[in-house]
């Protein structure tokens, strides 16, 4: 959904930009099109790099695959705290991070930051619930951002985009060990004179590979068979242990 | 050294997991209990999602029970007929438990249910064991002096229909009792990720009146089947069994259990009982405090599918 929406945005941006005969004003790519989560995965840095056709400011938005998220609030119930109210947010990016060449407010007007959802405050979080007041909605929203930030999946801070001679730019995107898997998109915006002069979208994948991925896929695709195998493994291990210690 | 757990979807330190397996295995060998009631809360403490801790706990108990039953079978301490009846009840209970589990999970109450179940059962069992291990406690037991247990004793339990003869246990009792006991333990196995030995063993001795020497082997036999079915159902319905985690825990678990069992013979049993009681009570108190204090963040979230 997000990818589709972003392509529409990109199309609008390109239509609005002055058409030039020369090559694209902005090109970008990532150092790895596939980040593999293997058994020893502890996080990974991916380099985003690119070039522009002249001066301008770069803003980078990294978004993980969208998922519906249930946020729950605990309330006091007698002596204990239990989950009471809950709210479901639709198509929340599972990972979100921004970086730019200068502080955003120095080159980008707030309406554009909002339109392109640059910054956690500008993320559109649609909720299915209608029975909650705007104050509650805002509280749940802030809680979601706070919790995601606490897990290192959202970062409200601004990463640095380094530029060289107004042409080349690069930035490191850090993915922590608990990064969700799926298709990621990096949106790169070139700002000039308070407008978006050009935009580029770089997709890439983060997926489990090797033994862990096979176990995960197997557990979800062939759940009953996985259960039987888990039992067989356990029975075998128990028998082996018994046999080993009997001789000892 | 970190290892990625594919179902729990987190990286953990291998040595931490191996250490936990060894420590719980040692305690279970020392005290003759399955250890599930210690392992599952420990896994939750280190950040494994409660659902995965429960499913994986059940899988791990399958292995430790198989190993235990084999050694009891060799000594002839297993009542197969009683085990079969207990298992029949246990399977029904486990199915109900897994179904309850998935409903509670979708409503956001599973973590609370797991914690409350642990607080209640660990609190009761720990309190009972501590009281029993206190010197002189048995003499001070209230009410009329306990009737000598044996084949001739008659209570309301003996008035129930569907009587069956259990030769090995020297019992002629209604099948409803072991069926019901198995059922309750089956529900607990599914919701708490425990084998239920800590409830089963006292219930078999005091409620059914089984001879002590066949109790542990028979309860282990029932636990194999109930935890195996729980593993199967949790895998099929909730995808919450992490075999990598289970196998890591087993690796050191069986060694710890063997070491614990060898040391157990050299210690005084009253001291061990009160030690275990204190351990069980402290886990219960830790969990109870966790429920009662105001959480650092009132909000929590969960990704939908």
Image (cartoon, grey):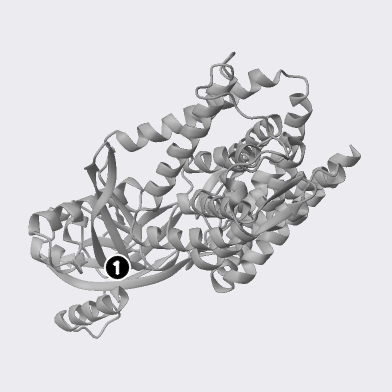
Tell me residue B264's x, y (percent).
74, 25
Q: Which residue is mark 1?
A: A187
Tell me residue B128's x, y (percent).
52, 28
Q: Relative to residue B102, is residue A21 drawn left or right? A: left
Instruction: Reply above or below: A201 against A84.
Output: below
The residue shown at (67%, 38%) is B153
Instruction: Reply above or below: B271 against B26.
Output: above
Q: Is residue B139 visible?
A: yes
Q: Relative to residue A90, is residue A196 drawn left or right? A: left
Which quadrant holds residue A30?
Answer: bottom left
Q: Secondary structure at mark 1?
A: strand
Chain letter for mark 1 = A
Task: Single out the residue that lies furthest toward the right.
Answer: A247
Instruction: Reply above or below: A49 against B298.
Output: below
The residue shown at (8%, 59%) is A134
Q: Nearer the viewer, residue A149 or A69?
A: A69
For the C terminus of chain B, the quadrant is bottom left
Instruction: Reply above or below: A58 against B185.
Output: below
Tell me residue B133's x, y (percent).
59, 20
The residue shown at (24%, 67%) is A189
* Mark 1 residue crowding within 10 angstroms, few (<14) / some (14–19) / many (20+): many
For the N terminus of chain B, the quadrant is top right
Tell me residue A40's x, y (percent).
58, 51
Q: Nearer the viewer, residue B229 or A147?
A: B229
The residue shown at (78%, 24%) is B265
């Amino acid at each position: 959904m997000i990818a589709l929406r972003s392509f529409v945005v990109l199309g609008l941006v390109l239509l609005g930009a002055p058409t030039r005969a020369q090559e694209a004003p902005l090109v970008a790519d990532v150092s790895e099109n596939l980040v593999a989560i293997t058994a020893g995965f502890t996080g990974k840095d991916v380099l985003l790099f690119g070039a522009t056709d002249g001066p301008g400011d770069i803003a980078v938005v990294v978004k993980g695959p969208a998922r519906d998220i249930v946020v729950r609030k605990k309330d006091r119930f007698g002596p204990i705290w239990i989950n009471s109210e809950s709210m479901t947010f639709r198509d929340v990016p599972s990972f979100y991070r921004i970086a730019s060449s200068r502080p955003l407010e120095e080159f980008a007007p707030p309406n554009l930051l909002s339109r392109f959802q640059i910054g956690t405050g500008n993320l559109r979080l649609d909720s299915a619930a209608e029975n909650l007041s705007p104050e509650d909605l805002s509280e749940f929203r802030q809680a979601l951002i706070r919790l995601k930030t606490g897990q290192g999946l959202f970062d409200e801070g601004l990463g640095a985009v380094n530029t060289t001679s107004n042409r080349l730019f690069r930035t490191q995107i850090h993915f922590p060990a608990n990064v969700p898997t799926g298709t990621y998109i990096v949106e790169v915006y070139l700002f000039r004179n308070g407008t978006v002069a050009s935009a580029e979208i770089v997709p890439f994948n983060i997926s489990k590979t090797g033994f862990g991925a096979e176990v995960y896929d197997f557990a979800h695709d062939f759940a009953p068979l996985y259960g039987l195998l888990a039992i067989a493994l356990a029975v075998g291990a128990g028998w082996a242990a018994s046999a080993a210690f009997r001789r000892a | 050294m970190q290892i990625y757990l594919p179902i729990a979807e987190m990286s953990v330190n291998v040595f931490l997991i191996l250490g936990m397996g060894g420590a719980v295995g040692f305690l279970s060998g020392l005290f003759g209990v399955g250890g599930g009631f210690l392992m599952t809360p420990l896994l939750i403490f280190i950040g494994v999602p409660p659902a995965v801790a429960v499913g994986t706990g059940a899988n791990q108990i399958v292995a430790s029970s198989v190993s235990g039953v084999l050694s009891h079978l060799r000594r002839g301490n297993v009542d197969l007929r009683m085990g079969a009846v207990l298992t029949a009840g246990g399977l029904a209970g486990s199915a109900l438990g897994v179904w309850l589990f998935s409903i509670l999970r979708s409503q956001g109450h599973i973590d609370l249910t797991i914690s409350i179940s642990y607080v209640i059962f660990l609190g009761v069992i720990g309190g009972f064991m501590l009281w029993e291990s206190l010197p002189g406690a048995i003499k001070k037991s209230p009410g009329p002096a306990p009737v000598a247990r044996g084949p001739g004793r008659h209570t309301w339990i003996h008035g129930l229909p569907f009587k069956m003869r259990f030769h090995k246990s020297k019992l002629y009792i209604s099948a409803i009792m072991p069926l019901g006991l198995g059922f309750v333990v089956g529900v607990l196995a599914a919701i708490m990720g425990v084998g239920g030995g800590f409830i089963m063993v006292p219930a078999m001795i005091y409620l059914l009146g089984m001879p002590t020497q066949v109790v542990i082997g028979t309860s282990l036999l029932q636990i194999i089947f109930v935890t195996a079915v729980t593993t199967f159902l949790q895998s099929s319905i909730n995808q919450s069994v992490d075999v990598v985690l289970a196998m890591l825990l087993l690796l050191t678990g069986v060694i710890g259990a063997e070491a614990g069992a060898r040391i157990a013979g050299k210690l005084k049993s009253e001291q061990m009982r009160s030690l275990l009681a204190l351990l069980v009570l402290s886990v219960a108190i830790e969990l109870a405090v966790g429920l009662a204090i105001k959480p650092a963040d009132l909000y929590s979230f969960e990704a939908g599918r």
